[in-house]
């Protein structure tokens, strides 16, 4: 059973939406977990989904003869996709924090809101860029 890109996008969107209210109030352990996940992998995962890096063969079209080779090629890019997701998420978190410090408007909840908005924007742009085709639907 392969993990579909849509499922990953829904999980990333849920983490981004849940992080905003948790940045203001909530149990400390849950706040740390959700906001940590957002900062570590939120915008980067949305960026990787936007540029379509990673497992490209998860759209249900594995009926070709080269499906096994296609699957192994997608698995070989998985470490690259994960490292790009983490690196770009941490870079965006650092850029947002540095901009807030230089603007003398330091507010961690606002930084979480900005990262959540960037994540949701990248997810929306990725969904709009590559719409789901209805050719195989019946």
Image: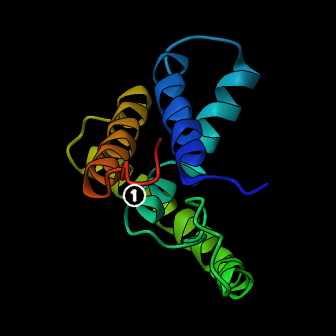
Q: Residue at x 39, y 45 (%)?
A: 119
Residue 65 higher or lower than 48, as above or below: below
Residue in the foreground of this view, choosing between 114 and 50? 50
Q: Position of residue 73 (x, y in %)?
A: 66, 86
Q: Position of residue 134 (x, y in %)?
A: 37, 48
Q: Assign the N terminus to one quadrant of the image.
A: bottom right
Residue at the extreme front of the image, as rendered: 138
Residue 72 higher or lower than 35, as above or below: below
Q: Residues within 10 Å of mark 1 (few under 14, many from 20)?
A: many
Residue 88 higher or lower than 69, as above or below: above
Residue in the foreground of this view, choosing between 101 and 31? 31
Q: Which residue is mark 1?
A: 92
Answer with left or right where residue 20 lies relative to residue 4. left
Residue 12 higher or lower than 58, as above or below: above
How many tags in the picture? 1
SS at mark 1?
helix
Q: Residue at x 40, y 36 (%)?
A: 116
Q: Position of residue 95 (x, y in %)?
A: 34, 58
Q: Residue at x 71, y 78 (%)?
A: 75
Answer with left or right where residue 113 lies relative to residue 31. left
Q: Position of residue 64 (x, y in %)?
A: 63, 79
Its colouring scheme is rainbow
Residue at the extreme right of the image, as rendered: 1
Q: Residue at x 74, y 82 (%)?
A: 68
Answer with left or right where residue 132 lies relative to residue 71. left
């Amino acid at each position: 059973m392969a993990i579909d890109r849509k499922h990953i996008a829904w999980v990333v969107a849920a983490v981004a939406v849940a992080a905003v209210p948790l940045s203001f109030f909530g149990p400390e352990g849950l706040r740390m977990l959700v906001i940590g996940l957002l900062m570590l992998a939120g915008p980067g995962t949305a960026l990787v989904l936007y540029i379509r890096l990673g497992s490209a063969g998860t759209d249900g079209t594995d009926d070709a003869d080269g499906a096994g080779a296609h699957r192994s090629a997608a698995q070989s890019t998985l470490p690259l996709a994960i490292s790009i997701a983490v690196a770009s998420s941490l870079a965006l978190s650092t850029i947002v924090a540095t901009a807030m410090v230089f603007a003398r408007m330091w507010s961690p909840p606002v930084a979480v809101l900005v990262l959540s908005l960037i994540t949701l924007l990248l997810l929306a742009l990725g969904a709009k860029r590559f719409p789901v085709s209805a050719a195989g639907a019946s």
